[in-house]
Image (spheres, grey):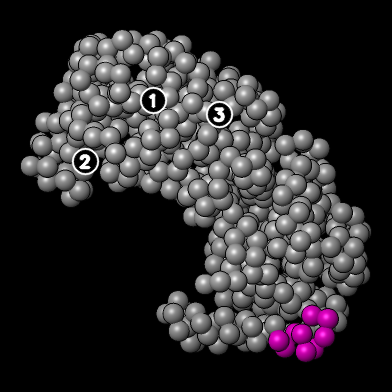
Amino acid sequence: MARAISSVGVIGLGTMGAGIAEVLARSGLDVVAVEIDDQAVTRGRGHLDHSTERALAGGKLDAAERAALLGRIRYSTSLQELSDVDLVIEAIPESLEAKADVFRELDKITRPDTVFISNTSSLSITEISVHTARPGKVVGMHFFNPAPVLKLVEIVRTVVTEPEVVTDVVAFAERLGKTPVVIGDRAGFIANALLFGYLNHAVRMYEQRYATREDLDAAMRYGCGYPMGPLALLDLIGLDTAYEILDTMYHQSRNRLHAPAPLLKQMITAGLLGRKTGRGFYTYDAPDSPTVVADGLTPASTVDSGGARKVWKVGVVGTGTMATGIVEVFAKRGYDVVLRARSAEKAAASVARVKKSLDKAVVRGKLSEEDATAALARISPAVDFEELADVDLVVEAVAEELAVKQAVFAALDDVVKPGAILATTTSSLPVIECAAATSRPSDVVGLHFFNPAPVMKLVEIVSTIATAPDVIATATAVCAAVGKQPVHCGDRAGFIVNALLFPYLNDAVKMLEAHYAAADDIDTAMKVGCGLPMGPFELLDVVGLDVSLAIQRTLFNEFREEGFAPAPLLEHLVTAGRLGRKTGKGFKDYSVS
């Protein structure tokens, strides 16, 4: 029989605790909210007043509903007030000792059948539960911030949690309008275990001055569709909170990728905790404000094209989806484009694909018929490399094989005029290897467009140790001219996006491989809990498991980082020919509708 829950205690009224209290009261439950002193109660009540005022202003509550919600919450500074509640949710700061003390006291005060819940985001529920006489009735219930908005709740069971308690807590989460996933007790659970490894990696990139904070964040927003970049997200979470979660994960996993980046500790020591202190990776106009203001690290808001070379005519080598997409991008923006293919038939077919894409844009109202006709007229098909002799910029977009690309660059070096820029769209190969096939390595740069090129705004501009400054300036100006968001990085495996994205995907495969959670639950956790557009297994199946494995191997071979070693399950699926959507089966089965 399901447990009847009508009254709930909430201990701790920080941002998360106050949010949980609001969720409970909004669902019609009576809430007893307990804080350490009157000042903390006042602060917690202020969180609730502010949040419900915003809900009222946004039309999500009317005045009567707001009054009823707030009327269901009773405040206290004594745990004794929780003696008659049916369930208690603890939401105090992430200290195992402090949480253990709270649960030890609760054990003496509450009824023997009262369920204890911890909202910890990283600590062991098992270690918390052993400080009570009822470990079977202790579970984790990890809400995500802001609790009134985000739907995901991770229900964390231990090896001794009673099955009926888990069932009751899942039903309770659903009653609150949440999406529960049930998982075992390990540091970080699903979402944080995957998210914080990625965030830590981004901090290391920034620490190594591989890319600026703005470029790191823009790369993940525009390249992956993430709602926030990693450094902006860390500022929102709080650097101190992130450090504690990573430290807990590291001490359990011993995975070096979870060891907090030294820069995090330095910033915490300096009091740069993120939004809550008004300064973290970015500077804000006031503590707790989301508004970023310029500081000494803010780049100029306009593209400095001084010193950039003039680009009037562009060549594109290749006939695949990426090549034709890039041709369309340049032609629509007024550039004359030479499309070089290996045969006249391939060239004609590629131009026809561009025309089809332009026609679709006209049908959708995104392009006028006149502009589409003009763009198509700017494209000249070619077979001989000599027809690229007078272009100002050549973009190579052939197969992702180094020998093939080197042959293309050697051929371009022979025919293209001096001063022209030679660019590669490689997503994983070293740009310097392409440059080495020419007599002009200073003119070679990476321009990594994202697929589909006409839609995706991001371009990674990859400079080698030999790339000339005016070539980088030209690439930046050209990206701006074609409406793209350029980000700059050095010539190493994965550049920014793939280097951050694929280790996260690989970690998700390892989590599945360990039978910690099902693929659907992991996907749900990352979409609902972190606001990502796709779960890791959905994304892997779209990208292709063979492509994903190749990128992960490239990262491992370059960095020799043990945590980057491809998950054996990924290797096995590729060997078995289960490559994702393109073969009908990957992590999921697409052969049945």
| Nearest to N terminus: mark 2 or mark 1 | 2
Identify the secondary structure beneath mark 3: loop
Q: Residue furthest front?
A: 1
- Amino acid type at image mark 2: Ser
Depth check, mark 3 against mark 1: the one in front is 1
Quarter-of-image position of residue 431: bottom right
Q: Position of residue 223 (x, y in %)?
A: 58, 55
- Closer-to-camera residue (3/257): 3
| Nearest to N terminus: mark 3 or mark 1 | 1
Residue 361 vertical placement versus 219 (above, below)? below
| Residue at figure coordinates x 47%, y 50% from the top left | 524
Q: Position of residue 116 (x, y in %)?
A: 35, 24
Q: Is residue 484 rendered to the left or right of residue 545? A: left
| Residue at figure coordinates x 40%, y 43% from the top left | 180
Q: Main secondary structure of the magenta part?
A: helix
Magenta highlight range: 341-349
Q: Which mark is residue 187?
A: 3
**Quarter of the rendering occupied by the N terminus:** top left
| Residue at figure coordinates x 80%, y 89% from the top left | 344
Quarter-of-image position of residue 388: bottom right
- Amino acid type at image mark 1: Lys
Residue 237 vertical placement versus 36 (above, below)? below
345 falls in the magenta region: yes
Identify the secondary structure beneath mark 1: helix
| Residue at figure coordinates x 45%, y 28% from the top left | 161
Q: Is residue 343 rendered to the left or right of residue 547? A: right
Q: Position of residue 36 (x, y in %)?
A: 28, 12
Q: Which residue is mark 2?
A: 27
Q: Which residue is mark 1?
A: 137
Q: Is residue 317 rendered to the left or right of residue 155? A: right
